[in-house]
Amino acid sequence: MTLEDEIAACRLCAADFAASATGHAPRPVLWSGTGARVLIAGQAPGARVHVSGKPFTDPSGDRLRSWLGLDDAAFYDRSRIAILPMAFCFGGYDMRGADLPPPRRCAETWRARLLARHRAVQVTLAIGAHAQRWHLGAAACRGGVTATVAAWRDHAPRIFPLPHPSWRNTAWIRRNPWFEAELLPALRARLKEVFDD
């Protein structure tokens, strides 16, 4: 059994998911290619991805692909990009309808082993607070997501911290015009460099 098969069969969080407001069963979603040069480290699949079984098949994915300047074919090319979130299953909603955080046990159980197999990765996109803490360390993330993303030059060209591409962050993007004016062009240029190498 491959590591990907083990993850696909994982049911560590079954009781937690059953007890959530959504009462759903685990469905791990990962998009892995051990030769990938780019790693997208997100938070966890959302409800739409839980249904589709394919990462970023939602408006957040549309926005992320726009940020990266990639079409669907390039984005889902496993030889180029691995999509390995901090948790592989949709965590469910709380009683108010808000997303539950990614269960820590998922990353603690699988992440180090999985990342060790992705030795070709040259660029990591750390999307959101959970991924940023894992890939950059707690000290680099003390000021929250805005401060971490604003300090992107401290981590580029190896790691680019990004806010979540959710449409809920549209106001954040308007308040931080440097994100689209400075970070995204640098990120697109770096991806072109990596893919053209």
Image (spheres, rainbow, N blue to C red):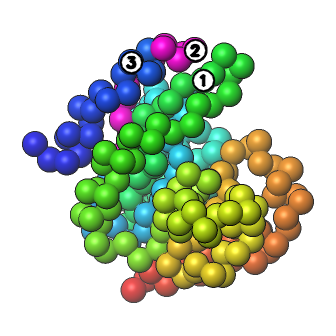
Which amino acid type is shown beneath numbered disc 1? Answer: Tyr
Mark sitting earlier along the chain (2/1): 2
Q: Mark 3 vs mark 2: which is more N-terminal?
A: 3
**Mark number for residue 93?**
1
Q: Can see residue 161?
A: no
Q: Residue at x 36, y 35 (%)?
A: 28
Q: Which residues are magenta?
A: 19-30
Residue type (three-letter) at the residue carrying disc 3: Ala
Circles 2, 1 touching at the beta carbon (< 8 Å): yes
**Residue sitting at x 85%, y 67%:** 177
Tell me if residue 129 comes above or below residue 142 in the rendering: above
Give the side of residue 178 with respect to residue 27, left or right.
Answer: right
On the question of residue 187 being in view, the answer is yes
Query: Mostly what secondary structure, the magenta segment?
Result: loop
Marks 1 and 3, how far apart at CA = 14 Å
**Circle 3 or circle 2, nearest the eye:** 3
Depth check, mark 1 against mark 3: the one in front is 3
Mark 3 = which residue? Answer: 15
Helix, strand or loop at label 3? It is helix
For mark 2, what is the residue?
A: 21
Residue 123 falls left or right of residue 149: left
What residue type is disc 2 on?
Ala
Q: From mark 3 to mark 2, how far is it between C-alphas?
A: 12 Å
* Quarter of the rendering occupied by the C terminus: bottom left
Residue 93 position, x and y percent, is 60, 23
